Amino acid sequence: MCQDLAPVDSWLVKLDNIIGFVKGCFQPLPGYFIVPRIVFGKKTWSLRGAISHRGVRFMKHECIGGRSSYIAYPGPAHFISPIDSAEVLREKCGSALCRAALELLEHIVSITDLVGVTGGLAYNPLGASDIDIVAYGPRIEEVYKALRDLRLDGITSPFTGRGHGWRDSDHILNSLIREQRYLLGYYKGFEYNIRLIYCTKPARCNPIRLLGRVKLEAEVISAIGFSTPSLYVLKPKRIYAGDEKIIGEIARAQLLQMLTYRLRYAEIPVRTVILVEGELESHEEVPRIVPDHGGSVSIIKTRAGYEH
């Protein structure tokens, strides 16, 4: 395993009855937030689906605003880096999808060796249906530029499908900006998803306060939309739902952040006007809206002037 990495987002985690992945860079150390993917031999795409299995214990934690999550600890849980998973792929998987994944990986290795595979390629390479790649560290912006160049050279093509758990609004959002999205696409006919993560080692998480749900129209003022998580600065234009306390918080802040770990909400261009619904959080007294927990993001007007 690369000595420059320790468990962070997209690392594979194996326990007796669960296979999942580490979520995020900020962790309840010595534990880690885990997103289960296989629970008692059955695949699940949602936290709700994982919670429904008896014998799987989820815990509420202040670092995620009192929401429930699965927390795994070293010892009972075995943590595997994406770099190590890529090495296994090189040694044991010869399918067309595996070969395509390793070829795409090589385009990134030329920039940073802190890159590997995650998702199905990490825990079941022969049964994987798409390519999941993750890169870490300070050179991910260079990686993103390389992904853009691959698209401009016609080596990859825009994603036109429908991702796991996508709503109609997610599909429409992608259709409006897919020509400018390089983290999702096709390589040699296979769907790929690439996560770019600044951190290489976990840090201890801090508490988050949940303020309530909100739905608002806003313009994207600035963005770090290529990384996981993606972070946007929004200028609210109209609030459609939210109690008086939330409206007051937004009015005092004037600008607020939107934070998302979902690739479907990454790469939204600056100057796009969006309709976003989600939980309003306060992290270190900064208000931010998170659409990942039962919320959504829709495009009202693109930078090019298209109105939906």
Image (cartoon, rainbow, N blue to C red):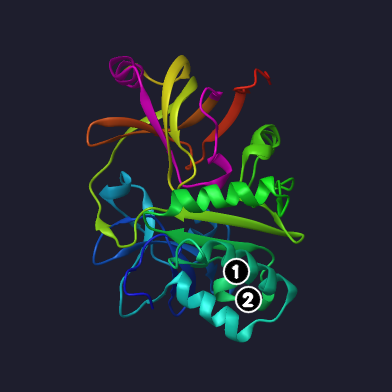
The residue that mark 1 highlights is: 120
Residue 248 among those drawn in magenta: yes
Q: Position of residue 276 (x, y in %)?
A: 51, 28
Q: Is residue 76 left or right of residue 203?
A: right
Q: Secondary structure at mark 2?
A: helix
* Vertical arrangement, residue 96 with respect to residue 179, above or below: below
In the picture shown, does residue 84 fall above or below 221? below
| In this picture, residue 216 sits left or right of residue 138 | right
Image position of 211 (left or right of 40) = left
Circle 1: element type: helix
Query: Do the numbered discs 1 and 2 sit on residues whose CB atoms are within 8 Å?
Result: yes
Residue 125: give its label: 2
Q: Looking at the rendering, in which quadrant would you find the N terminus?
A: bottom left
Q: Which mark is residue 108?
A: none
Look at label 2 and name its amino acid.
Pro
Q: Which residue sits at x=30%, y=62%? A: 201
| Crowd class of label 2 (few under 14; some 14 to 19; many from 20; radius 10 Å) | many
Residue 93 image position (x, y, % from top left): 65, 81
